[in-house]
Structure formats: C-alpha cells, structure tokens
Image (spheres, rainbow, N blue to C red):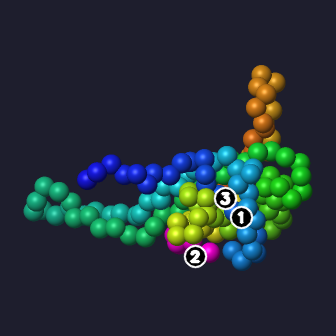
C-alpha cells in the first residue's frame, strides 16, 4: 500500500459543547488546547477447557471512557472555562454536557465525534510564577459511547 497523502494536522480541529441535549452548539476551539482520553475498550471474557492450549475468548459491551478537555483559563462568563465550571459546580445530579470534536475542523464530508455525559472532574486554575504561559484549566466528561458521523453541512 502506498503512503497516505490524506493525513490531518492536529492544529486544525474544532471542538464544540452543548448544554441543551446536543441541539445548539457553542464552538470552544479558540480556548481548547487538546482532547484526550479517546481510547475506548470493550469487556472481554474467556474460559478454558480441558482440550487445547488457549482460551475461548468472547467480547462484550463497550466500557465507559473519560474524555479530558484542556482549556485556557479565563474569567469571561461566556467562555469555556466558566461554562464548564458552572456545570461542574451545579448542585444535584445534573451536570451533563454534550461534547463534539472534528479533527478536520468541521469541513463538510469529514467526521465529527460526539459524546454525552456528566462532567466528573474539573481543573481549577493552577498558578506557577516560573512560567509566562497562559493558565490552563480543564474538565473531564465520562461517557459510555462516542457517536461518529459524517458532517453534512
């Protein structure tokens, strides 16, 4: 097989969030540095019999995964840091959010990945006098499934 010419740059992605059940989306690309924790596993099980050297292995359901979003710390009410903080600090059992990212930057015909779940972890602003880099925060969404879809428009 020949070497691919369709590789994508990490620097051109888009990231969006929705707080109304994946209906209306807010682009947070301008404050998001990375999305990680995107590896999902499946349950598996095995059994051994008296015959043969190896086990009989079967797969099961998908395991949950934790998507980690690294975002720039700001104190602007409508920017991602304050949006995520407000959801995380909500009283009660709510605090769920839809997240969607597109490695190709949301271009029609490419893919987006969408997940829904609670914010289970939030990074408050760490500070360090030895660096001039922007302060980073972040949040983690726990989900059981990532939906893959082709971007139509």
Which numbered circle lies on residue 17? Answer: 1
Label 1: state its secondary structure: strand
Marked residue nearer the N-terminal end (3 or 2): 3
Label 2: state its secondary structure: loop
Look at the image and give the residue range highlighted in magenta. 147-153
What's the distance in space between the residues labelled 3 and 1, CA to CA?
7 Å
**What residue is drawn where x is 73% and y is 69%?**
25
Query: Can you give x and y, in whole percent of width and height, for residue 127 in the image?
Result: 80, 32
Q: Nearer the viewer, mark 3 or mark 2?
A: 2
Judged left or right of residue 132, residue 22 is left
Q: Which residue is mark 2?
A: 152
Binning the other alpha carbons within 10 Å of mark 2 as few (below 14), some (14 to 19) or many (20 upward) gives few
Query: Can you give x and y, in whole percent of width and height, for residue 19 in the image?
Result: 76, 70
Which numbered circle lies on residue 78? Answer: none
Residue 89 seen by the camera: no
**Is 150 within the magenta?**
yes
Verify CB contact (< 8 Å) between mark 3 and mark 1: yes
**What residue is drawn where x is 61% and y is 54%?**
13
User: In the picture, which quadrant includes the C terminus?
Assistant: bottom right
**Is 26 within the magenta?**
no
Query: Can you give x and y, in whole percent of width and height, for residue 152 in the image?
Result: 57, 76
**What residue is drawn where x is 86% and y is 59%?**
78
Judged left or right of residue 87, residue 140 is left
* Total labels drawn: 3
Marked residue nearer the N-terminal end (1 or 2): 1
Residue 6 seen by the camera: yes
Q: Nearer the viewer, mark 3 or mark 1?
A: 3
């Amino acid at each position: 097989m020949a070497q691919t010419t369709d590789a994508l740059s990490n620097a051109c992605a888009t990231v969006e969030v929705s707080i109304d059940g994946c209906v209306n989306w807010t682009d947070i690309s301008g404050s998001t540095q990375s999305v990680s924790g995107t590896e999902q596993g499946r349950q598996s099980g095995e059994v051994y019999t008296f015959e043969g050297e190896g086990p009989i292995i079967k797969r099961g359901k998908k395991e949950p995964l934790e998507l980690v979003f690294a975002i720039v710390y700001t104190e602007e009410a409508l920017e991602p840091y304050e949006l995520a903080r407000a959801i995380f600090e909500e009283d009660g059992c709510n605090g769920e959010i839809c997240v969607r990212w597109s490695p190709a930057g949301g271009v029609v015909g490419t893919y987006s990945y969408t997940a829904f779940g609670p914010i289970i972890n939030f990074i408050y602003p760490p500070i360090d006098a030895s660096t001039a880099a922007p302060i980073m925060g972040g949040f983690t969404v726990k989900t059981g499934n990532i939906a893959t879809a082709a971007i139509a428009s």
